[in-house]
Image: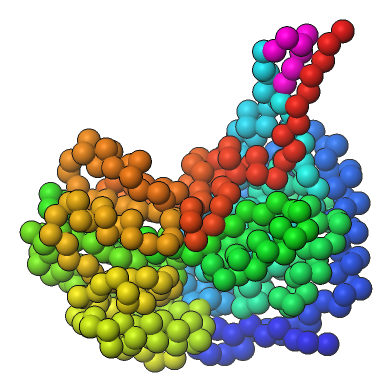
Amino acid sequence: MSIIETTNPYTNNKIKSYTKFTSEKVNLMLKTADNTFKEWKLVSLKDRAKLLDNVANVLHENIESYSKLITDEMGKPISESKAEIEKCILLCDFYRKNADLLLADELIKTEAQESFISYDPLGVILAIMPWNYPFWQVMRFAIPTLTSGNTTLLKHASNVTGCSLIIEDIFEKSGYPKGCFQTLLVDHNQIEKIIEDDIVKAISLTGSEKAGRKIAEIAGKNLKKSVLELGGNNACIILEDANLEKYMDTIVKSRMQNTGQSCIAAKRFIVVESIYDKFLKNFTTKIKDLKSGDPSNKDTNFGVMARQDLANTLKEQVEKSINKGANVYFGNKKERTYYQPTILTNVKPGMPVFDEETFGPVASIIKVKDKQEAYDMASNSKFGLGTMIFTNDIEDAKKHISNIEDGSFFINELVKSDPRLPFGGTKASGYGRELSREGILEFVNKKTIYINK
């Protein structure tokens, strides 16, 4: 039997070992999920939504221990871990209050005596989730998917196995029938067989572009729907009238939150030359003020990267970019999982830190001559998760909304997910949407009903 071991990335101490599931156990879990679905889909939407209060209560009552587990397994500052749990509570609240409205039959006037669209659950949905927001990424999939009447299986990242099992426990404690939510402790090489099983009706993946292409291939081959939230290379445009004094903390957070390990983080800071020097000075001052240290310390606001191989990959991207002409303006020291907050200047297209997703605390600064070049540079990416613009001229910024192909467009705010708004990307950042009405309708059968006497 193969083993999964979790390790604290800050101390490098082993946390716990887990035995991976056999094929026989996985098959049993698939059948359990399918059998539970047949009963769960018959539970009224009102009663399914009521259970979200229980989930929120369990999260609230255990916020200290759950936050500590997140920090121990992936190195996030404890304050950010607590914020992640709190966001999950808000998610429960949103769908508890709105599920009835979001899934209500939609009446359509036709020649029929009665015609409408109903929204029926599909069945067993497989989720493949990453480690960077180990509770939030799972909950934003599971809450709407379960509430719409599906059952779920989770393949979580192995380094947050403790979190994955705790989340299963949360749903059981909250009164969900056994089989509604199950965690699979399996290898990636078992995933294809699971997807191919007739019991699995659809797949949701949050992960890298490479993983997304592979899962999309398997899902397509088996004619199964998939929702993919993949990598990002978000631009943060700083125009000459940007209020740096007001928004600099937000701008720094947009890159350094979660130690830069976020698909929607600002990776490319595109700055108009008239404000470039001022921006660079203020940005650097704030970066230097970040407090590194033990992530479990409440005063730490900059943690470590989740694994040493991730830090090594980031270092390689930076070094290749330096060889192509990028300059290290600040930082770039690495020790095991610690990667110093880093600022690179003279960054240009063709460098890894411009073209690729940099999943860590490296800010690439690009100087442009004017507003038009700034927007053109922002669009120069194969990714399409989100763009943020800082400016005092809101009306002018709104004129550029349709020119940006990304899944989101934020003015004077960092790109972030919100239960009330749809979240997802375009191009190499994937397809489909999570959250809001769009998210709860991803894994339902939009059925046409047509009735005549």
- Can residue 329 be seen at all in this image of the molecule? yes
The spot of residue 409 in percent (x, y) is 36, 47
Rendered residue at 59%/57% (across/down): 228
- Can residue 47 be seen at all in this image of the molecule? no
The spot of residue 430 in percent (x, y) is 54, 57
The spot of residue 417 in percent (x, y) is 47, 51
Q: Quadrant of residue 67?
A: bottom right
Q: Which residue occupies the foreground of this view, 89 or 134?
A: 134
Q: Which residue occupies the foreground of this view, 395 or 242?
A: 395
Rendered residue at 15%/68% (across/down): 280
Which residues are the magenta region?
Answer: 110-116
Q: Is residue 366 above or below residue 443?
A: below
Total of numbered circles in the picture? 0
- Magenta stretch encompasses residue 114: yes
Left or right of residue 126, residue 295 in this image: left
Rendered residue at 23%/61% (across/down): 270
Q: Which residue occupies the foreground of this view, 427 or 124?
A: 427
Q: Which residue occupies the foreground of this view, 71 or 325?
A: 325
Q: Quadrant of residue 107?
A: top right
Q: Is residue 45 above or below residue 326?
A: above
Rendered residue at 21%/75% (across/down): 345
Q: Which quarter of the figure is the N terminus placed in?
A: bottom right
According to the image, what is the colour scheme of the structure? rainbow
Left or right of residue 278, residue 32 in this image: right
- Magenta stretch encompasses residue 233: no
Q: Which quarter of the figure is the C terminus placed in?
A: top right
The spot of residue 128 in percent (x, y) is 66, 64
